[in-house]
Image (spheres, helix red, strand yellow):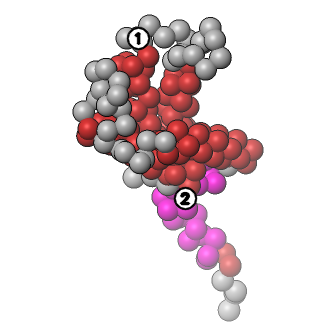
Amino acid sequence: MRRLYPPFVGGWRGIGLLFLRIVTGTAFILHGWQKIENPFHWMDKFPNAAPAFLQGMAVLAEVGGGIALILGLLTPIATFLIACDMGYALAFVHLPHGDPFISATAGGPSYERALVYLGISIAVMLVGPGRFALDAMLFKRRDWVVEEKREWLKMPAA
């Protein structure tokens, strides 16, 4: 697990990561919740729809990844799933359709949101979830020598 998690950032930067995780995770839950009623066929009405397995994985990535992102639980896996989901949306939906970066009309097609979410997921994957995450509680690195010295210094003299 040590290779998956960089040192957990604390202080104001950790609070910033917590805020980013909560906002992004909530957006993904809401984005995927629309698809959860029919997780393997929500995309069938579109031409060149993805296979049912990939449609289900997208729902899992959005809802499950969003929940995991908010909690900061298994963050490398959650951000990887979200990055794959957004990469697929960019490569097989938005860019082939010629969608612009920013839509010319309100509510029109664009690839801005997918690219921003891809960037956020990659950034959190590389930086880590921060100290205010379940991952930090479960997988934090400990310097056992320093902890033993602290315990030894606390012992009363005989």
Q: Quadrant of the C terminus?
A: bottom right
Is the residue under label 2 in contact with that under label 1 (CB below 8 Å)?
A: no
> Which residue extends farthest front?
45
Count the marks: how many? 2
In the image, which disc is placed on residue 78? none
Q: Residue 83 at what x, y percent from top left? A: 43, 32
- Examine the structure image and report whether residue 138 is included in the region drawn in magenta: yes
Q: Residue 141 at what x, y percent from top left? A: 51, 56
Query: Residue at label 2?
Result: 134
Question: In the image, is residue 131 above or below residue 84?
Answer: below
Say whether residue 11 is left or right of residue 122: right
Magenta residues (range): 129-152
> Which residue extends farthest bottom?
158
Identify residue type, mark 1: His
- Examine the structure image and report whether residue 137 is included in the region drawn in magenta: yes
Image point (48%, 11%), residue name: 99
Q: Residue 145 at what x, y percent from top left? A: 53, 64
Mark 1 or mark 2: whose residue is earlier in sequence: 1
Identify residue type, mark 2: Leu
Image point (44%, 28%), residue name: 86
Say whether residue 145 is left or right of residue 151: left
Q: Can residue 61 be seen in this view?
A: no
Mark 1 Cα shell of 10 Å, populated few (<14), some (14-19), many (≥20): few
Circle 2: element type: helix
Of labels 1 and 2, the one closer to you = 1
Query: Residue at label 1?
Result: 97
Image point (59%, 12%), residue name: 103
